[in-house]
Image (spheres, grey):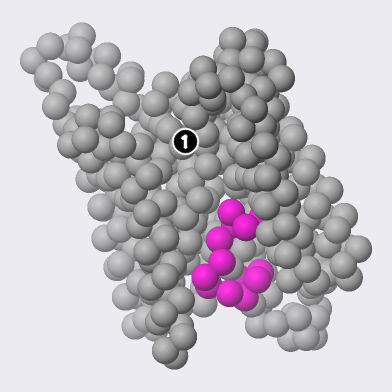
Amino acid sequence: MTPAILANRRKLWVMTALVILCAIGYLLVRVQFENPKLLHYALNLRAPKLYAMLLTALAIGGASIVFQSIINNTIVTPCLLGMNSLYTLIHTAVIFFAGSGSFLAVNANLSFAVDVILMGIAATIIYSYLFKKTKHNVLYVLLVGTVLTSFFGSIQTTLTRVMDPNEYDALLVSLVASFQNINSEILLFATLLLAALVFALRKELALLDVLTLGKAQAINLGIDYDTCIRRLLLGVTLCIAIATAMVGPVSFLGLIIANLSRQLLKTYRHTQLILGSTLFGMVVLVGGQLIVEHLYSYQVPVSVFITVGGGLYFLYLLLTQKKV
């Protein structure tokens, strides 16, 4: 075992310990241990939110590393695939046509199912069928995702302009990523979906190290490159769809944690990169939510800090790559 691998393992263990500390802090900060009922109530309230953050970090962290490897570009993010904009359009359309008091808008389970089904259908059509039609050109597919992001955003903006102001206020709550009032049934369903997705793509994920060598090299090694890329791209889109449907859009999280993982570990091994990205995501979400709840008293959502920090980090990546 090389010194680089050992060094990366030590870094991952440190990150794991940091995640555990953040999780313990989130569960136990300002908890009244002398009152068992209040302790039990606090843990029941915080545990689902903690699990939602860990699951979101797993989905977005893994999908971001895979997406960057497919595109062969480290400053892209899966939000370019249009799932965030589609999520926003779906919720805007529901409030606009059915109203904020409708069963579809109020029922969390039904809303999650509609989000996952519609985004799953869109992902299958766009990133499976069109990938074939564009002769397996990943850049064309990425361009389609960028155009669809603008298209969905334009429709959503048009609907909000003519929407009743009271309905718009109700809409804004669902358009911001939030870990409040997490439904445990949704968490179970999302866990099963992600587990099934990882199981279905286990062979392609095992070949990621080879796929990043390039199309010609992968084909020479006996890999069906186009099929692998198509399945991985669809898997990335579905992962982002599940995470977005569960907590809302978190645009720059994938960009931040994927690049932090690459800068920390400096390896081509995707098992370490995906694990590092996931651990960074857990630290960002759990630590950020801890600050939001106990320092800002829920006044600012954690997604706002992620968006601002992600935008600045994106500019930093652009400037540093330009210098190179």
Q: Residues within 10 Å of mark 1 (few under 14, many from 20)?
A: some
Q: In this view, does 184 lie above or below 298?
A: above
Dot 1 amino acid type:
Val
The answer to which quarter of the image holds residue 153 is: top right
Q: Name the residue under label 1.
A: 176
Q: In this view, does 200 lie above or below 173?
A: below
Q: Would residue 109 appear left or right of 52 to someone viewing this image?
A: right
Residue at 20% x, 9% y is 37
Q: Position of residue 27 (x, y in %)?
A: 25, 31
Q: Where is residue 45 in the image (x, y as percent from the top left)?
A: 33, 20
From which residue to which does the magenta span run? 69-81
Residue at 71% x, 64% y is 142
Q: Is residue 232 among what the camera can see? A: no
SS class of the residue under badge 1?
loop
Instruction: Indicate yes or no whether the magenta region holds residue 228.
Output: no
In depth, the one of 13 and 310 nearer the eye is 310
In depth, the one of 305 and 255 nearer the eye is 305
Q: In which quarter of the image is the N terminus?
A: bottom left
Instruction: Indicate yes or no whether the magenta region holds residue 80.
Output: yes
Q: Where is residue 53 in the image (x, y as percent from the top left)?
A: 41, 39
Q: Residue furthest left?
A: 34
